[in-house]
Image (tube, rainbow, N blue to C red):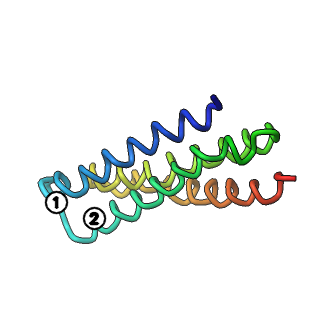
Amino acid sequence: MSWTRTVGSVSTAASIVAASFGSHGLQKLEGYTPKKQKQWEIANQFHLVNSVALTFLSPLLAKERLALNVAGGLLSVGITGFSGSIYAKVYAGDDKFGKGAPVGGIALILGWLSIAVLRR
Protein backbone atom coordinates (compact mmCIF):
# COMPACT_ATOMS: atom_id res chain seq x y z
CA MET A 1 0.00 0.00 0.00
CA SER A 2 1.25 3.47 -0.85
CA TRP A 3 2.03 5.98 1.88
CA THR A 4 -0.45 8.37 0.25
CA ARG A 5 -3.30 5.93 0.79
CA THR A 6 -2.38 5.49 4.46
CA VAL A 7 -1.85 9.19 5.15
CA GLY A 8 -4.93 10.13 3.13
CA SER A 9 -7.14 7.64 4.97
CA VAL A 10 -5.97 8.78 8.40
CA SER A 11 -6.35 12.42 7.36
CA THR A 12 -9.87 11.76 6.07
CA ALA A 13 -10.79 10.19 9.41
CA ALA A 14 -9.29 13.21 11.20
CA SER A 15 -11.37 15.53 9.02
CA ILE A 16 -14.52 13.71 10.14
CA VAL A 17 -13.48 14.13 13.78
CA ALA A 18 -12.83 17.84 13.11
CA ALA A 19 -16.25 18.18 11.46
CA SER A 20 -17.89 16.58 14.47
CA PHE A 21 -16.09 18.96 16.82
CA GLY A 22 -17.08 21.88 14.59
CA SER A 23 -20.72 20.82 14.80
CA HIS A 24 -20.91 19.89 18.47
CA GLY A 25 -18.05 21.46 20.42
CA LEU A 26 -16.92 24.64 18.74
CA GLN A 27 -19.84 26.67 20.06
CA LYS A 28 -18.72 25.89 23.63
CA LEU A 29 -15.33 27.59 23.19
CA GLU A 30 -14.77 30.95 24.81
CA GLY A 31 -14.95 33.68 22.20
CA TYR A 32 -17.09 31.66 19.78
CA THR A 33 -18.51 33.68 16.88
CA PRO A 34 -20.35 32.74 13.67
CA LYS A 35 -17.25 33.97 11.78
CA LYS A 36 -15.11 31.40 13.59
CA GLN A 37 -17.68 28.72 12.74
CA LYS A 38 -17.44 29.63 9.05
CA GLN A 39 -13.62 29.60 9.17
CA TRP A 40 -13.70 26.14 10.77
CA GLU A 41 -16.11 24.87 8.13
CA ILE A 42 -13.93 26.17 5.27
CA ALA A 43 -10.84 24.56 6.81
CA ASN A 44 -12.77 21.33 7.20
CA GLN A 45 -14.00 21.32 3.60
CA PHE A 46 -10.46 21.74 2.31
CA HIS A 47 -9.24 19.09 4.76
CA LEU A 48 -11.82 16.52 3.67
CA VAL A 49 -11.61 17.06 -0.09
CA ASN A 50 -7.83 17.04 -0.25
CA SER A 51 -7.55 14.07 2.12
CA VAL A 52 -9.85 11.99 -0.07
CA ALA A 53 -7.81 13.05 -3.10
CA LEU A 54 -4.61 12.03 -1.32
CA THR A 55 -6.13 8.63 -0.58
CA PHE A 56 -6.86 7.98 -4.24
CA LEU A 57 -3.61 9.31 -5.70
CA SER A 58 -2.03 5.89 -5.33
CA PRO A 59 -4.11 4.07 -7.96
CA LEU A 60 -4.11 7.14 -10.23
CA LEU A 61 -0.32 7.46 -10.20
CA ALA A 62 0.62 3.84 -9.49
CA LYS A 63 3.33 3.70 -12.15
CA GLU A 64 4.56 7.24 -11.65
CA ARG A 65 6.42 7.32 -8.34
CA LEU A 66 7.86 10.82 -8.76
CA ALA A 67 4.45 12.33 -9.49
CA LEU A 68 2.91 10.38 -6.61
CA ASN A 69 5.55 11.51 -4.12
CA VAL A 70 5.60 15.15 -5.24
CA ALA A 71 1.82 15.51 -5.41
CA GLY A 72 1.28 13.53 -2.21
CA GLY A 73 3.90 15.51 -0.34
CA LEU A 74 2.52 18.85 -1.47
CA LEU A 75 -1.08 17.87 -0.65
CA SER A 76 0.00 16.63 2.79
CA VAL A 77 1.87 19.86 3.53
CA GLY A 78 -1.06 21.84 2.15
CA ILE A 79 -3.66 20.10 4.29
CA THR A 80 -1.58 20.59 7.41
CA GLY A 81 -0.60 24.16 6.59
CA PHE A 82 -3.97 25.41 5.40
CA SER A 83 -6.54 23.52 7.44
CA GLY A 84 -4.30 22.92 10.44
CA SER A 85 -3.42 26.57 10.87
CA ILE A 86 -7.05 27.66 10.57
CA TYR A 87 -8.15 25.01 13.05
CA ALA A 88 -5.46 26.22 15.47
CA LYS A 89 -6.39 29.87 14.94
CA VAL A 90 -10.07 29.25 15.64
CA TYR A 91 -9.49 26.86 18.55
CA ALA A 92 -6.89 29.02 20.28
CA GLY A 93 -8.64 32.27 19.44
CA ASP A 94 -5.34 33.76 18.27
CA ASP A 95 -4.82 35.05 14.73
CA LYS A 96 -1.08 34.34 14.80
CA PHE A 97 -1.85 30.65 14.28
CA GLY A 98 -3.50 31.42 10.94
CA LYS A 99 -0.29 32.63 9.34
CA GLY A 100 0.43 29.19 7.88
CA ALA A 101 -2.76 29.18 5.81
CA PRO A 102 -1.32 31.00 2.76
CA VAL A 103 1.68 28.65 2.61
CA GLY A 104 -0.65 25.67 2.94
CA GLY A 105 -2.90 27.05 0.22
CA ILE A 106 0.05 27.46 -2.14
CA ALA A 107 1.16 23.89 -1.39
CA LEU A 108 -2.35 22.62 -2.23
CA ILE A 109 -2.34 24.52 -5.52
CA LEU A 110 1.11 23.19 -6.40
CA GLY A 111 0.05 19.67 -5.43
CA TRP A 112 -2.87 19.73 -7.84
CA LEU A 113 -0.78 21.32 -10.59
CA SER A 114 1.94 18.71 -10.10
CA ILE A 115 -0.59 15.98 -10.86
CA ALA A 116 -1.34 17.65 -14.19
CA VAL A 117 2.28 18.35 -15.06
CA LEU A 118 3.98 15.18 -13.82
CA ARG A 119 1.38 12.66 -14.94
CA ARG A 120 2.36 11.22 -18.29
| Image quarter of the N terminus | top right
Determine whether the residue tagged by mark 2 lies in a helix, strand or loop.
helix
Q: Which one is closest to the eye, mark 1 or mark 2?
A: 2
| Earlier-in-chain disc, 1 versus 2 | 1
Estimate how packed mark 1 is, as few (under 14), some (14 to 19) or many (20 or more) residues with alpha carbons within 10 Å: few
For the residue marked with disc 2, what is the amino acid?
Lys
Disc 1 from disc 2: Cα separation: 9 Å
Rendered location of residue 64, percent (x, y): 82, 41
Which residue position is annotated with label 2?
A: 36
Label 1 with label 2: CB-CB less than 8 Å: yes
For the residue marked with disc 1, what is the amino acid?
Gly
Q: Is residue 16 above or below residue 9?
A: below
Which residue, as the protein is rendered here, is positioned at the far front? 59
Apparent side of residue 33 relative to residue 107 in the rendered image (left or right): left
Apparent side of residue 69 relative to residue 27 in the rendered image (left or right): right
Estimate how packed mark 2 is, as few (under 14), some (14 to 19) or many (20 or more) residues with alpha carbons within 10 Å: many
The image quarter in which residue 115 lies: bottom right
Number of marks in picture: 2
* Residue at x 39% of width, y 57% of height: 44
Determine whether the residue tagged by mark 1 lies in a helix, strand or loop.
loop
Which residue, as the protein is rendered here, is positioned at the far right? 120
Closer to us: 78 or 69: 69
Q: Is residue 27 above or below residue 69?
A: below
Which residue position is annotated with label 1?
A: 31
Q: Is residue 111 above or below residue 7?
A: below
Rendered location of residue 120, percent (x, y): 87, 53
* Residue at x 39% of width, y 42% of height: 13
Closer to us: 95 or 106: 106
Rendered image: mark on residue 73: none
Closer to us: 50 or 93: 50
Rendered location of residue 94, percent (x, y): 31, 54
Apparent side of residue 47 relative to residue 36 in the rendered image (left or right): right
